Image: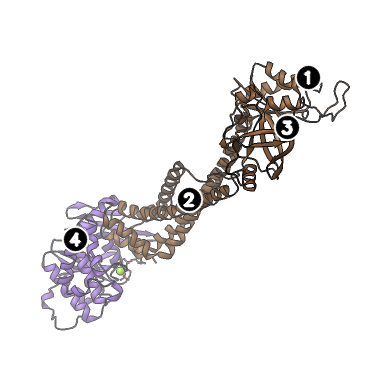
Chain colours: A brown, B purple
Amino acid sequence: MFNRDFWSEIFMALRRNKLRTILTGFAISWGIFMLIILLSAGNGLKNGVTSNFADRIQNTYHIWASFTELPYKGHKANRYIMLNNKDIQLLETLYQVEEVSPVLSQGGTLIFGEKSKSVSMEGVKPIYKNIEGIKMVDGRFINENDMKNKMKVVIIDKNTSDELMRINGVSTMIGKTVFINGLSFTVVGVCKGQPWGDYGQCYAPYSTLQALYNVNRYYQLTFITRGLNTKEDNEAFQKELKKKLAALHEFSPDDKRAVWIDSQMVNSLETNRIFNTINIFIWVIGIAMLISGVVGVSNIMRITVKERTNEIGIRKALGAKPRSILLSIVMESLVITTIFGYIGLFCGMGVMEIVNMVLKTGEVATGGGEMSVFVNPTVDIKIVVSATLVLIISGVAAGFAPAWKSVKVKPIEAMNYR
Amino acid sequence: MIKLNNINKTYFGAQPLHVLKGIDLEVAEGELVSIMGASGSGKSTLLNILGILDNYDEGDYYLAGKLVKNLSENQAAEFRNKLIGFIFQSFNLIPFKTALENVALPLFYQGVNRKKRNMMAMEYLERFGLKDWAEHYPNELSGGQKQRVSIARALVTSPKIILADEPTGALDSKTSAEVMQILREVNATGITMVIVTHERGIANLTRKIVHLKDGVIESIEENDPDKMDFTKEIK
Ligand SMILES: Nc1ncnc2c1ncn2[C@@H]1O[C@H](COP(=O)(O)OP(=O)(O)OP(=O)(O)O)[C@@H](O)[C@H]1O
Ligand SMILES: [Mg+2]
């Protein structure tokens, strides 16, 4: 059945109606193209957003303090709550808290050779690297030994490191001694930084900075938890923690603003939910576009079959079986949808590959410090396979109705048509 | 070869039209029969029923001993492909296929492979003096050439019966004579043939002339074509 003659008949029919074939095909190409672009963009957005905290472990928490919303126990509203060492102690007594890393923020000036630069220095524990997903470019992060011995070591961000290297003509900053607020620190690591203006970002051991500055005020505390695996667990824990902090700082447990307790896991779940919704939305749009393409093909096939009524009548008179006529029309439609579908598919994937390449070179140019909105915007093989299936099904569907009609018509009516 | 019992056919259009009103007819194997009658008398309708291109409402039609009634589309296709060859007034060649491809098409539906198909088609084209026209498309051929192509196409499957609806209707008298000569030669090889015509000259070349009037057979006339003088024009 599907021999060379069969196919040559089909391709002859397609070639005979070049314009028609191309116009119909275009609708299908466009539908698939847009579907791929949308899906890739959706993927890219998701990859982009999740990659910004992909290296962070999930069971992490951030706490910020802020202004109170409600008056409570003789305190007026809008009182500023400052986190302190008592909060750290409180957290450490909680069963669910595995390890706390305060964020001891200390602004200052870094001086190395000819160059001085404003930096924000944060005293943190080794675990902070995982909590924030900090990526090392060179050297190492703070370790337990630094903590125990209160070492005066520092990790600087890549932009700062590059700047210092360039101005001082050195090839690495690792092992160099820099001065921060007049105190000497040894650089042990370089990390990817967040591009917050012209500020450099440094990390030093919490114990070291605590000993140097004797701090009892924190804008932010971070910690990792154990045994909190679901959204419900986390929400219950958040509630309990809030109550305890409220008691400690004398603010209303109903106060929504005084402290912010932020769970990475809850955020991730929320983000995933949003992206799943976006994904569904994209499929709906894409499928709708495809359907309009398929309707187009079906319409054109109807017209084609009508134009070919006489020919089909003649073929029937010569002994063509219904199956042969049905198949030739369905296959014609299938060939159009598949060929042009794949053109759309490959164009879409090509465009997204180019976008991907541009993004990658862009990342290199900016030192990789950017928050990426768009990462690896490509589609995986699963989507290609399902798109193929959708194409085949829609091709058959588009051809079937007109084909069936032409099978049903009596040969003499077909021959005398017009 | 053909046996019709009380065939009735009504077209259900805006107004039902009873076209065939009880046709009884027998055609023996190898016979050459013509059907004559006024325009609208139902000649084509009858021929289409014989060719299983159309269905009938009442009666029985036996073709080569088999009852042709309520056939599936597949069975009908088999019959048309293996037993029947058609020749039409308007040729009904497929315009985008060459003469050779047109002639080979019925063999395609028999599953004959391309090489053999083209060889056989070529043989028939040669037989009708169309060898040099094999690669031409129908619109590059004259009326007589087109009709000869369609005769070749009708014969290529070696059918038992040829049904021709006004085969000379679109041809001038000289070409008509040539085509009729070919058809008579084909009949002489033993193939049964039914020709619809409204030209007496054509009917005179057949052995049996069926006169149709308003959907009934008025008379069946025996005729001796050998009395005809072929050197004369037939129209
Ligand atoms: N498909 C159809 N639907 C309705 N009426 C039809 C149809 N085909 C033919 N008729 C009518 O049936 C009658 C017989 O038609 P038919 O074609 O058999 O005549 P004919 O004898 O071949 O005439 P002609 O010599 O003009 O070809 C005519 O009145 C015609 O109008
Ligand atoms: Mg007629």
Asked whether residue A412 is in view, the answer is no
- In this rendering, the count of numbered labels is 4
Chain where mark 3 sits: A
Pointer 4 indicates a residue of which chain?
A: B
Q: In the image, what residue type sits under mark 2?
A: Met
Q: Which label was assigned to residue A105?
A: 3
Q: Which mark is residue A349?
A: 2
Q: What's the chain of the residue with tag 2?
A: A
In front: label 2 or label 1: 1
- Give the x, y percent position of residue A383: 46, 43
Q: CA distance from mark 3 to mark 4?
A: 88 Å
Say which element carries label 3: strand
Quadrant hosting ligand 2: bottom left
Pointer 4: what residue?
B115
Seen in the picture, residue A217 relative to A324 is either above or below; the reply is above
Residue A55, quarter of picture = top right
Q: How much space separates mark 3 and mark 2, taking CA atoms?
A: 46 Å
Q: Mark 1 — residue?
A: A248
* Spot occupied by residue A406 in the image (x, y as percentages of width and height): 37, 56
Inspect the image, locate mark 4, and give the three-letter code of the amino acid beneath it.
Answer: Lys
**Few, some or many residues within 10 Å of mark 2 (<14, 14–19, 20+):** many
Establish if A357 lies above or below B29.
above
Distance between the alpha carbons at the discs numbered 1 and 4: 97 Å
* Viewer-nearest residue: A399 or B199: A399
Mark 3 or mark 4, whichever is nearer to me? 3
Sequence-first disc among 2 and 1: 1
Query: Going from the N terminus, do you reach mark 1 or mark 3 first?
Result: 3
Viewer-side residue, A81 vs A313: A81
**Residue at x 72% of width, y 25% of height:** A210
Q: Is residue A378 above or below residue A148?
A: below
